[in-house]
Amino acid sequence: MIVDKIKKRNIPEKRKKVNIDIPVGKWAKCDKCKEIIYKEELKKNYGICPTCGHYFRLHINKRLELILDKGTYKRFEIDIETNNPLGLEDYPKKLKTLREKTKINEAVACGTGKINGEEVVICVMDSGFLMGSMGVVVGEKITYSIEKAIEKKLPLIIFCVSGGARMQEGIISLMQMAKTTAALTKLDEAGLLYISVLTDPTYGGVTASFASLGDVVLAEPGAMIGFAGQRVIEQTIGESLPEGFQTAEFLLEHGFIDKIVERKELKNTIHKLIKFHKGGENSCQN
Amino acid sequence: MSKLTAWERVEKARDPKRKTALEYIENIFDDFMELHGDRNFKDDKAIVCGLANIGKQNYTIIAEQKGRSTKENIKRNFGMPNPESYRKAIRFMKQAEKFKRPVITFIDTKGAYPGIGAEERGQGEAIAKSMFEMAKLNVPIISIVIGEGSSGGALAIGVGNKIIMLENAIYSILSPEGYSSILWKDSSKYKEAAQIMKLTAQDLYDLNIIDKIIKEPEGEESFEKICNSLKREIKKNVSELIIKKPEEIVEQRYQKFRNMGEFITLDKPCIDREV
C-alpha cells in the first residue's frame, strides 16, 4: 500500500537526488530512481523496483529460489578457503567477517537442482561477497562444477556477477581464468550444454573467461557487462562514454549475447533452452 | 640472481630500451615470416603472428609487440591488443594444429586495450576464446614472458605447456599502480604494491605458475646470451613434448592449469540454504 502511494507521487527531479536516511531493516532504496521501497514488496516483485523497474542484485539464496524447483537444490560439499597466497594481513579476517555477514561461504554457490523438472548443475555468484570477485575458491568451485556436470552428463548453468579477478590473491586469481576456461573445453567436448547468465555487473576476468563462453549467453535487462571498467576506459581515451555503453542491450546489439531475458522469465527460458538441446531419437547421428 | 626490489624489476620490464618480441624472434629463429590479419575485421599490430624455423623444426609464432619508437608505438598501440589481435592469434593457433607445428608465444603487454571499440568488438570474449582454443590445442605451446605480463591481456596467449620467464620480466593480475588504487584506493603506493603482489619471476616460480627462469646477465653480450638460453629452452621443451600423443599434450597442459592455486578446508562453513 505504502509502495503504491510512493509510486504515485511525482517527485521533482531535483528532490530525487537528495540523500535520504533510510530506516534500517524493512526498507530499501532503489539505486536508480532513489525511491524508498518496502522490502517485502521488493521481495515479492523478484527484487525489481516497483517504481522504475530497476533490477536489484540478488543474494545467492534468492536466486536459487527463483530458478530451481522447490526442495531440489543439493549443494556440492566443497567447503574450502584460500591459503592467502600473498600473505595479506587483513584478508583472512575480512573473509571471516563477510561469511558471518552474508551467511555464504564465498562469492559462488554450486550444486545440482531441477528447473521445471530438468536436472542441472548450477553455479550462482553473489556481488555481496567482495563484489563476486574470483580467487582460488571461486575458480575451484566453478571448475569442480564443470567436472561434475561432465561426470553426471548434466547441463551447466552459471549466473555470473563479478567485478573480475580478485586482487587479494594476485596472480593466482588471474590463473583461475585459464583454469575455468580449460575445464569448459572438456564440457564442450562432452557435448554438454552450458548456459551463461550475465547479471549486473559482470566485468574483468570473469567476462574474459567462463562468462563469455556459454553455448547460450543470456543477460538480465540493464545489466552492466564489460571487460575494462568504465573509469579505466575514460582515463585511457580521455573522453566520456556514450549513453548505454556496456549495458546488456549494448552487448546484444554488438552480437555478444544471445538474448536479454526478464528476471521473471529466466526460469522458463532456461527450461525451454534445455529442452531444445535434448537430442533424443531425432538428433543427427554423426 | 641479482637482488633487485620488485619495483626495480617492474622498471626494468618496462624500460623503453628493453628488447621487444621481434628482436628476440629474429635472433632465436633461423628464419621468420610475418603473416597478417584476423580475416574478420583488421590486422591489429599489437600482436605479431607468423612462421619460423630452427633447422628443420617449424614453429608458429604469436607475439605481443611493443613499439621501439614513438612512431612504432602508435602503430602498435603501445603493445595493448584489441580483440582483433586475439582473433588473429586464434587463427594462427588453429593453423598450427592443422599443420602440426608447435606454437611459441611471447608475452609483453601492459594489458588488453581498454577502449570503446575494444568493448564493442568483445574484448572479454576474444580473450576467453583465445584461452579456450589454447587449452584444447593438440600441439605443444611454449609461452615466454619477456617483459610486462599484465592481466588477462597477457594470459590470453599464455596458456602454454611450459611457461618461461626472463629474470627481469614481470607477470601480474594488474599493474602495481592499478593494484594499489583498487586495493588501497591510493595509486601512489605502487612500490609497496609491487612488493606484495608476487610478480617477479622468482615469486612465480615459487608459486608453481612458471617452469623456468632465464637469467639476464649484465654486460655487452647480455642479449645474445639470453637469446641462446631461450633457443636452448625452446628446442629442449619442444623435443620433449613433440614425441607425446596429441591427447597427452592437451592433458599435460590441462593438469598444469587445473592445479593452479592452493586452498584449505574451511573450518566452519555456512550452508547456502537448501531450497
Image (cartoon, coloured by chain):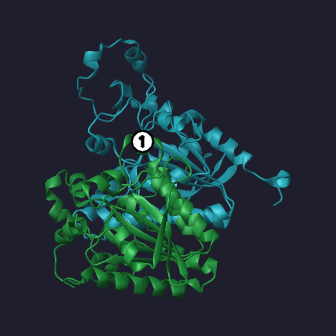
Chain colours: A cyan, B green
Tag 1 residue: B117
| Whether residue B167 is situated above or below residue A71 in the rendered picture | below
Q: Quadrant of residue A59?
A: top left
State the SS at label 1: helix
In percent of the image, x 58 and y 51: which residue is there? A214
- Provide residue B134's location: percent of width, then percent of height: 53, 66
Residue B50 in sight here: yes
In percent of the image, x 42 and y 45: which residue is there? B118
Q: Is A21 on the left-hand or right-hand side of B133? A: left
- Provide residue A256's location: percent of width, then percent of height: 53, 43
As drawn, which residue projects farthest toward the left? B188
Quadrant location of the N terminus of chain A in the rendered image: top left
Residue B273 in sight here: no
Q: Is A64 on the left-hand or right-hand side of A151? A: left
Inspect the image, locate mark 1, and give the three-letter code of the amino acid beneath it. Gly
Q: Label 1 lies in what chain?
A: B
Q: Is B219 on the left-hand or right-hand side of A198? A: left
- Residue situated in front as seen by the camera: A207 or A48: A207
Quadrant location of the C terminus of chain A in the rendered image: bottom right
